[in-house]
Image (spheres, rainbow, N blue to C red):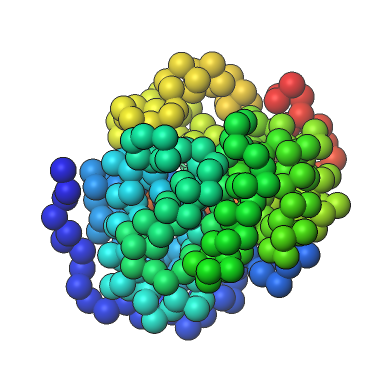
Amino acid sequence: MRITDKTNPTEFRAIEERYDDMTYRRCGQSGILLPAISLGLWHNYGYLDNLEKGRNILRYAFDSGITHFDLANNYGPPYGSAEENFGILLKRDFAKYRDELIISSKAGFDMWSGPYGNYGSRKYLVSSCDQSLKRMGLDYVDIFYHHRPDPDTPLEETMAALDHIVRQGKALYAGISNYPAEMAERAVNILKDLGTPCLIHQAKYSMFERWVEEDLLDVLEKKGIGCIAFSPLAQGMLTNKYIDGIPENSRAAKSMTYLEKENVEANLSKIKQLNEIALNRGQKLSQMALSWLLKDDRITSVLIGASSTNQLKENIEALDNLVFEEDEIRKIDEVLG
Ligand SMILES: NC(=O)c1ccc[n+]([C@@H]2O[C@H](COP(=O)([O-])OP(=O)(O)OC[C@H]3O[C@@H](n4cnc5c(N)ncnc54)[C@H](OP(=O)(O)O)[C@@H]3O)[C@@H](O)[C@H]2O)c1
């Protein structure tokens, strides 16, 4: 079902001071700077969501210096609807700011029926990129990612597809997501040989998901590739929202999400202890969770989601304090085990 578009037709003029307070970090050894906080549209932008609310969040983000919006073919629900809704808002509010934006999309998870709508074939990636451009009403995306490794398609084919998309002018840069370290290094080498360097790796990284620390971050640093950390708040668990139970309308309370109540409950003791550490350093837990990632300058940006402008505001304020005492790091490590 498609919700009627009731968005406010008044013209959006971004505030002049929008770049004054945001921190920008170089993405690996590329020419691109990304805001330390980027905004993802995985949730809150599908047909079932309130487009006016989503519009306000995007406007607030851009006014705060957030220049990077991240999408994928299958964001919604239903699949494709986040890109369509983003296309509507882009046309209304951001068309004149297109050159100030880094817009990304991806293909790699199941998108359409049959053998050509999933994983990593050239057939899937090239068609999916075309579809994404059409849905968003764009001539090109800034970054096009392969969304996850494909165990069966030769890596050479998938990387050649990214190279092809960039050479066609349909994406300015290529990226990979969810690739383990060894496979990421091979992908980066293939892309380099093709003449389309890999810009960025999008990896799940938060206090609760630390796999990238093992060897991926070292590989990316060695190769000069940026890293954008997705779900840095563990889908909302690393905030104070679940401390007194599971609020109505939260991601854990909703169906069709990937955050289980059981997962929240299993982590509650850690969440409460982390919350105490955050309060003692004068931050909200959400802010400490983001600062904790950004204290490592190999992290180009943290890619958050937000279901309100208040959440977004709170999260941006994390940038006011990125410094940790050794004792704070030790206490956090003890809680995380
Ligand atoms: N490459 C991949 O495979 C992949 C996978 C997943 C995500 N991503 C990208 O990463 C983006 C972010 O993922 P995510 O949405 O899981 O990130 P997240 O920042 O970990 O979680 C966002 C959710 O946390 C809650 N939240 C955020 N700030 C809050 C605050 N200050 N106080 C209380 N609650 C707060 C909100 O949930 P409520 O709705 O409950 O309010 C919000 O929707 C996605 O949009 C997508 O672009 C990529």
Please tell me which residue lies in front, 252 or 189: 189
- Left or right of 169 in this view: 331: right
Image quarter of residue 205: top right
Q: Is residue 99 above or below residue 78?
A: below
Which corner quadrant holds the N terminus?
Answer: top left
- Left or right of 254 in this view: 325: right
- Name the residue: 54% across, 62% down: 165
- Name the residue: 51% across, 32% down: 237
Q: Is residue 39 above or below residue 170?
A: above
User: Is residue 25 at least partly visible in the picture?
Assistant: no
Residue 93, horizontal then vertical, whole percent? 33, 73
Please tell me which residue lies in front, 315 or 87: 87
Residue 174, horizontal then vertical, whole percent? 61, 58
Residue 13, horizontal then vertical, whole percent? 36, 80
Please tell me which residue lies in front, 113 or 295: 113
Q: Is residue 167 above or below residue 72?
A: below
User: Is residue 256 at least partly visible in the picture?
Assistant: yes
Q: How many marks?
A: 0
Q: Is residue 2 above or below residue 204?
A: below
Please tell me which residue lies in front, 36 or 86: 86
- Name the residue: 48% across, 27% down: 243
Residue 77, horizontal then vertical, whole percent? 31, 41
Which corner quadrant holds the C terminus?
Answer: top right
